[in-house]
Amino acid sequence: MDNLMIARVAKFSYLYRNHYMRILGSNIELIRTHWWHAFRFLLMKLLNRGRNEIVSRRIREMVEDTFDGIIDIASPDGIVRTGEKALSKARLAFEEIQYDGKGYKSEADIQMIFGSKSSGEDSRQGILQFLMALPSGNIVQYSINQIQNHSIAGVYEQLCQFPGVGHIGAATYLRDLVELFYDELDEYTKTVDSQTYLVPVDACVRRVAKESGIMFDCSSPLEQARTLAEACREVSIVHKLPLNFSQGAVWLCDKTFESLMSMLKRELPG
């Protein structure tokens, strides 16, 4: 790998981390101690997939408006005291709510949050029903505990059991948690587990990669992801720098841009 590509990878790492942390906008301690903020964090990851950001935000606002007064969103563990009657009432309110005459949400969104209405073998649990059974009702704290116990696959499989939650949504959520709580995780989780759940890059990643001057040889998003991941891994191996994973992107750890730029200044003439 030549010095120019090393510089481009380092710049990508710097730009993407800054962009990622800016759009994340989450209070780390709040999402791991308060069920409602943790639930909203999860919804943001799941509802954003394939949607306009405005539509995704509208649906999240609808959830909050229909929960308020029915489900306790003020208490850190309010969801665990929610009964089936309140859940049914919240579901009906969510199904009927509209903004400016538009419903925005789909039937898949309703089932993802509240579960399917069918009974017997066809019945599928929604996210809220799962949260009601957790000690604190906090999906983020539950996920972090499982990841620290090397059970990231178990969390992934649990998420995929909810209606409407597919591979990309589950993997994006988990990858964001790995990034947010990076310092609390061991090297196995940061490498082997995270690489297992690598997904194709999204539009944001491609934009930042373009700004960094990284050119892809083919147009396939999956091939672009592989090209970017391999470049980052090669730099990581050569210079013994750890990798971060999130939203389909693989990039070098914090402070890498500065350290690699210092190295290149020493190696390059002038």
Image: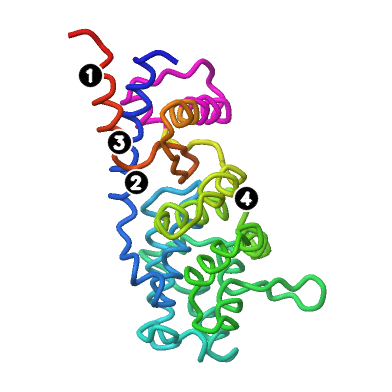
Q: SS for tag 2?
A: helix
Q: SS for tag 1?
A: helix
Residue density around tag 2, few if under 14, some if 14–19, many if 20 or more, within 10 Å: some
State the quadrant of the C terminus: top left
Q: Nearer the viewer, residue 115 or 207?
A: 207
Circle 3 sits on which residue?
14
Is residue 204 highlighted in magenta?
Answer: no
Relative to 2, is 261 on the left or the right? left
Which residue shows up at 41% across the image and 71% down it?
A: 32
Q: Mark 2 and mark 4: span between their CA atoms?
A: 21 Å
Indicate the amino acid at tag 4: His
Circle 2 sits on which residue?
20
Q: Find residue 167 and name its label.
A: 4
Circle 1 sits on which residue?
265
On screen, 83 above or below 177?
Answer: below
Q: Mark 3 and mark 4: span between their CA atoms?
A: 27 Å
Nearest to N terminus: mark 3 or mark 4? 3
